[in-house]
Amino acid sequence: MEAENFFEISLGHGEDLRTYMVKDYEKSEDGQCKFEVFLAGKSILSLEPEDDTFRSCKNPGGLDDETIHQIIDQIESYHL
């Protein structure tokens, strides 16, 4: 059975502050995780582990590379 966990990350400052919900899917077959990032209830980014970091596998929100890297940094800080 698949366990699901949610946590919140925030990027930006002041009026530019955005809060994202991150869904952590644990994969029982290999122990690795897949993350899906939501903004205002919509899926905007999906990440998978790659070596020592994560890679974007879907980007329906059209996020730029800088924002993706900031999100990855926040997710990694939760999973050290």
Image (spheres, rainbow, N blue to C red):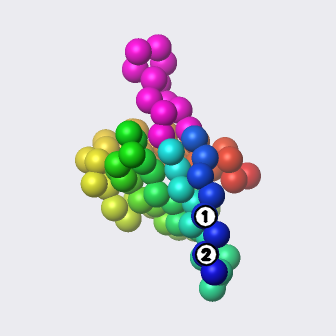
Span colored in magenta: 9-20
Image height of 23 relative to 68, above or below: below
For the residues bearing labels 1 and 2, Cβ distance under 8 angstroms: yes
Q: Residue at x 68, y 47 (%)?
A: 78
Residue 51 image position (x, y, % from top left): 58, 67
> For this rendering, which residue is in front, 7 or 77?
7
Residue 11 image position (x, y, % from top left): 49, 30
Q: Residue at x 62, y 58 (%)?
A: 5
Q: Amino acid at mark 2?
A: Glu
- Which mark is on residue 2? 2
Say which quarter of the image contains residue 46.
Answer: bottom left
Callout 2: helix, strand or loop? loop
Q: Is residue 41 magenta?
A: no
Residue 57 image position (x, y, % from top left): 38, 65
- Which mark is on residue 4? 1
> For this rendering, which residue is in front, 63 or 43?
43
Relative horizontal placement of residue 13, taking residue 33 as reference (left or right): left
Quick check: can you spot residue 13?
yes
Quarter of the figure that contains the N terminus: bottom right
